[in-house]
Amino acid sequence: MKVLKFGGTSVGSAQRMRDVAALITGRGKNIIVLSAMSDMVIVCVVGDLEWQNRGFEAAALDALKDIPVRMISYGGSNYNISFLIRRADKVEALRQLSRHPFNRP
């Protein structure tokens, strides 16, 4: 078994994604780690996301309503929700998330 990691410029265009897909398909049992494409970042919001604590994910989405989001990862953990955004939007996204009230009465 091999661990293969791809990210940055190796997945920075549609052609490079196709090249990676061709490389990893049919290679047997491998662990594939795919990180963000070039010019993209992953912003992870951490909190208590147990199913009975409703509203946290909506609050995070509301905070990022003016930020173009490429992908949302939610449900893989009870403690975080992740957003894939453009690197150029990272500072504004963090600013908006830090200003947004996540605590409810």
Image (spheres, helix red, strand yellow):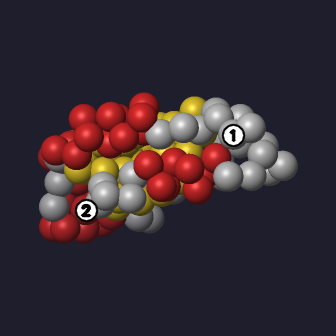
Q: CA distance from mark 2 to mark 1?
A: 42 Å
Residue at point 35%, 35% (across, down): 94
Q: Which residue is mark 1?
A: 104
List the single residue furthest toward the right: 52
Q: Which residue is mark 2?
A: 17
Q: Is residue 92 left or right of residue 39?
A: right
User: How many numbered marks are there?
Assistant: 2
Q: Percent position (x, y) of residue 28?
A: 51, 56
Q: Indicate which label's residue lies in the foreground, 2 or 1.
A: 1
Q: Percent position (x, y) of residue 71?
A: 41, 59
Q: Percent position (x, y) of residue 78?
A: 72, 40
Compared to residue 46, the image places residue 89 above or below, namely below
**Neighbours of disc 1 within 10 Å: few (<14), some (14-19), many (20+):** few
The kind of residue on which mark 2 rests is Met
Residue at point 24%, 35% (across, down): 91
Q: Is residue 81 left or right of residue 100?
A: right
State which quadrant residue 7 falls in: top left
State which quadrant residue 41 falls in: top left
Residue at point 36%, 40% (across, down): 96
Q: Is residue 74 left or right of residue 31?
A: right
Q: Is residue 68 left or right of residue 39?
A: right
